Amino acid sequence: SDDMKKILVLGGTRFFGQKLVELLLEQKHEVTIVTRGVSENPFGDAVEHIKVDRKDKAAFEQALESRTFDIVYDNICYSPNEAKQLCDIFNGNIGKLVFTSTLATYEADGKPHEEVDFDPTSYEIVMGETHEFSYGEGKRLAEAVFYRFADFPVVAVRFPIVMGADDYTRRLHFHIERIVNNEPIGFSNMDAEMSFIQATEAARFLMWAGMENVEGPINATANGVIALKDLISLIEEKTGERAKIALLGTEEIRSPYAIPASWYMKNDKSQQLGFKFSHIDDWLPQLVEEIAKSTPKQ
């Protein structure tokens, strides 16, 4: 429907979270963002801005406890404790939660994963804070907590690595910078294949998942996969430099994409529900070129 919705976005000031807020504002929704006040609010008066640290439980609850929203987007929940707190605050007060989850809920075991490969409803819950778990385990437990304790519908959007020129994790940038500067990159298996999603498409997907009748865990990834050796060849082609590849080696040279086996997922469920994804070849070469152009040789 085209109704204006009241929407809360946790993690809406940078990268794909910022793009999501921009899309929601374009569609004339009423958007509230929550930040600790550290990062800039790039939207000014177009949004309501609540400054509070979610790790300050009492303050976070006080800021949100009486509020109602049609949709809540949580891009920055990494632990079962944070998920449980959200259920406690929002049960009875929101229409739907869209939670940003991850490919890391699946094992990097060379198999293309579908949603059923990780079932959060049968996963044993262990409570704890972010630092007590690996990234993937924190997200698995957060999903399990939401599906156990939320009385509102929950969409767990499982993204692969999100790519974009403004990616603050700079994972793709790392490879381009090292190749431009003839510095070694460590890999364990260059034949391993990965899938990615482009940041604007990730934002479009989040908006779609909130507005449409979508529920449960759902994979969101561009069509197509790329082997690491082909990604490196693409960077060589766009930079005019030869990559120096090392076998893993020290942590400092290790690629953030150094996976032991192919690690990607299928997006059939999303496609069947009507979301159309780009193909990785539609945008990855241009993205590599764009980042390469702005990468100085040291």
Image: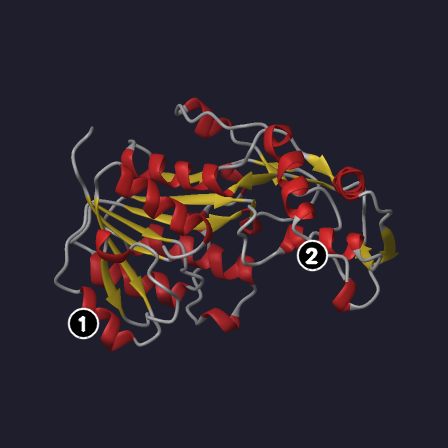
- Who's the residue at 80% across and 42% down the image? 236
Q: Earlier in the sequence, mark 2 or mark 1?
A: 1
Q: Identify which residue, 228 or 189, lies in the foreground.
A: 228
Mark 1 is on which residue type? Gln
Q: Please tell me which residue is depicted at 74% across the width and 45% down the height of the picture.
A: 261
Marker disc for residue 210: none
Of 267 and 76, nearer the camera is 76
Image coloring type: secondary structure
Please name which of the two marks, 2 or 1, marks the residue nearer to the observer: 2
192 vs 273, left or right, is right
Residue 174: mark in rendering: 2
Q: Position of 16 compared to 212: left or right?
A: right
Is any part of residue 8 visible from this angle? Answer: yes
Percent position (x, y) of residue 192?
76, 42
Question: How far from the left and from the top, in percent, is residue 109?
Answer: 69, 45
Q: Is residue 165 above or below residue 266?
A: below
Horizontal arrangement in the rendering, residue 100 relative to residue 210 (left or right): right
Q: Circle 1 sits on which residue?
A: 62
Gap in angstroms between the C-alphas marked 2 and 1: 40 Å
Residues at marks 2 and 1 touching, judged by CB atoms closer than 8 Å? no
Q: Nearer the viewer, residue 5 or 154?
A: 5
Disc 2 crowd rating (10 Å Cα; few below 14, some 14-19, many 20+) is some
Which image quadrant: the N terminus? Answer: top left
Picture quarter containing residue 195? top right
Residue displayed at 73% across by 52% down: 175
Does any portion of residue 219 appear in the rendered image?
A: no
